[in-house]
Amino acid sequence: MTKPPNSQASQFWRLPTDALCTQLGCSLQGLTATEAAKRLGRFGPNSDAPPRIEGAMRAILRRLLEPLSLILLVAGIVSMLTGDDIGGLIIVLILAGSIGLDTIQEGHAVRAAEILRRSVALKAEVRRDGAFREIDVDHVVPGDLLRVRAGDIIPADALILESTAFTAGEAALTGEPYPVQKRPGAATDPDDTSNALFRGAVAQTGEAIALVVRTGRDTVFGAAASALAEAQAPSPFERDLREFGLVIARATLALVLVVLTVRVVFGRPVLDSLLFAVALAVGLTPELLPMITTVTLSRGALRMAGRKVIVKRLAAIHDLGAMTVLCTDKTGTLTSAEITLAGSLDGEGKDNARAAQLGAIAASLGGDRGSLDAALVAGRPDAAQGWTLAGRQAFDFSRRLGSVLATGPEGTLLIVKGAPEAVLTLCTMDESARIAALARVRELASEGLRTVAIASRAWSGVLREVETEDETDLAFEGFCAFADPPKPTAAAAIAQLAARGVGLKILSGDDPVVVKRLASLVGLNPERVLSGTDVAALSDPALAVQVRSTDAFGRLAPDQKSRIVRALQAGGEVVGFLGDGINDAPALKVADVGLSVDGATGVAQAAADMILLASDLEVVADGVEEGRRTFANILKYVRMGASSNFGNMLSMAAASIALPFLPMLPTQILLNNLLYDLSELGIPFDRVSAQATAQPQVWSMSRLARFAAIMGPLSSVFDALTFVALLFLFKASPEEFRTAWFVESMATQILVIFIIRTNGRPWRNWPDPVLAASSLIALLVAMVLPFTPLGTWFGFVAPPPIVMIGIALLVVVYLVCAELLKPLAIRTGRKR
């Protein structure tokens, strides 16, 4: 018996066929095309409940309400209201461009995923107007008479009316890895669904005709899909970005209020003080951060598309780079998902082709076309030549064996194949030999091999269909051993992930013995495997401890996968989950970054943040590197704002209180900020050192605070030295003071980019030409502008040459000090 995938679903499998037909208003002859069209309009298309998709306006509003966006919007509006139309317009345009880019990119990704889903649209075979015909699965309606064959994906929930050796794989729904036998007949136990088909299951063997009862959102599959409409918690990157925005907002508000209040108390002009405070707010706000983030992530998404990854959520690129543990099933990711014949053994465990030869004959003539039969035929493709089928007994999952009666060169043979425990009891052998044979089965299982036993006997009677009573007095021929070998790239990919600080854990529904063997083959710790029973017996705190030292889990139920993900997160890990079944959808949503594959169920793809077009861990390893590269470039901008830019604004605030004149006019501050932002436009294109992508990196507010606490005051110290030199050494006028400090400020802010952009020595890691060009062009404009007629518009005057020489000397000394202090300010690691 199989437990229903969703106990809340209507238990139609318990109703008599006549009662079900009456309820559906149909007969067992199928529908007419006219009636089917009416029902399609009534019940709707047979498709998933679409996940909640944000409209464009809602997506824009969500981004606009982020703290950084609100600061920029307010600063831009205030700038325009106080007369600085150009500065305010520039801020608003930057904000609009950033939000627009982010919204468009995510929209493209969602549409690409939808196109991918539709590209694998399936057909269904239903009886219409008295004949079976193929139609789109979307057009299947309740009351249809459905025919399914081996290999078909079940398109709707249905009641079986007829079946021939029919089995279905319900792993995508229940997590159960083995096929389930399906047959007609009333069910008395509510948990017995052997007479029901469920949408999303896969027909493994045989053929069946069934009455469609539920379609679309009313199916078990559709109910699970609708759960995806629930809001998803913010990702680690989104949480960190919001936290950073709140910190900047508090700092900006506090500094502006202090400056404005003190200047007004000291009797300075209110309007000048207000304009200066607004200019300070703009200077303190990293207005390019949304754009830098969006462009960097978008470039990462494009590069990942070239590596066969569709990015549905841009922030997931960073989360993939921050990932410390990846949880994955074994089939199709670590293994090839192609069962192969690994060996043929006689009763004593010695290599002997006899078992595989007979097994291949049975599989060719009367097999169930399952994966094991396909492996037998592939391993011995010519075995059935000269043999003909005289009768058969279909594989019975309750007895776990099946048989064929074959006539050929050896006469007529009854060949029985099935589970060793079932076949051995039918053989004429003593108990000690049977125990020894079962011990060999366990030994093979420890090597990751699944076994099928083969037995036979000569047939002397009339040729006819095989009965259960005929399967006695058999001669044991031996075992066929099967393997689902690990992919050749699996061990190398796991080692590559481990070298980058990402651990891997196998979360499988398969036998723990098989999982243990696979773990040893791909380089994981095979000493301990927790089963689903073990996990169920552990409390959440105990599980959080156990998952730290366990790499492999077997016989897991779907909800236990989610528990393990949460347990890892409780231990401070950033967790990725790679899954492809509907039963994986909850874990995909719980994980910090959800990964699915092309060919996965639509529900799994909808729950995932990324879709891998190649089911290979090498793709994930490449994605991890890409995520870290994007984060490293985003972090460069934040560090720059936390060092010279933030230090200069603090110096300016202090000088505005201490000096009898404004140290820089509001328009000059905005020009300074604009040129500095232009110098950083090349950051998304910058190169990233191998050191920066070697380990998982997260957005650490404590590290940023330490960086700002060291590099910011360093900038302020040199600003103070500049003030002292200008006032007391060079006796500069207010206009000369502003011009000289503008030049010094721009030179230190822009040139320090080349120091801060790398953790190592700048001359060992040259910047990308785009960043070098954007920075040096902005620096050139800043150096030349005060000495041109245009400079007078901003209140600049040309300082004496001796002043410029002094400024140049201060800049050089500052850059040397910044390089010396950088190792103290930058510390790598995972701790927040």
Image: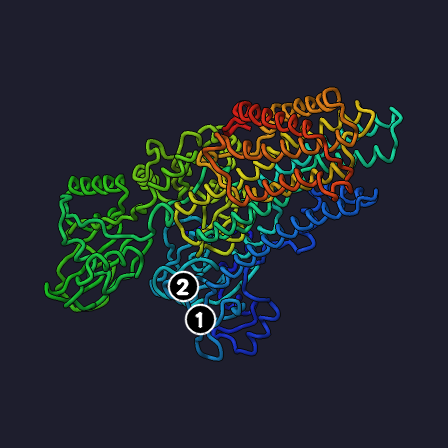
Q: Position of residue 823 (x, y in %)?
A: 52, 24
The residue lying at 83 percent from left, 42 percent from top is 82
The reply, left or right, for residue 449 in relation to residue 197 is left
Label 2, label 1: how far apart the Cα atoms are: 10 Å
Residue type at tag 2: Asp
The residue lying at 66 percent from left, 32 percent from top is 645
Query: Is residue 701 positioned above or below 104 on the image?
Result: above
The reply, left or right, for residue 695 in relation to residue 652 is left
The residue lying at 23 percent from left, 59 percent from top is 378
Disc 2 to disc 1: CB gap under 8 Å: yes
Between 231 and 824, the one lying in front of the other is 824
Hey, which quadrant is residue 52 in on the image?
Answer: bottom right
Hey, which quadrant is residue 807 in on the image?
Answer: top right
Q: Position of residue 468 (x, y in %)?
A: 25, 58
Residue density around tag 2, few if under 14, some if 14–19, many if 20 or more, within 10 Å: many
Q: Is residue 5 visible?
A: no
Between 91 and 591, the one lying in front of the other is 91
Q: Check disc 2 and report the residue beneath it.
A: 152
The residue lying at 14 percent from left, 62 percent from top is 459
Q: Secondary structure at mark 1?
A: strand
Q: Check disc 1 and report the residue beneath it.
A: 125
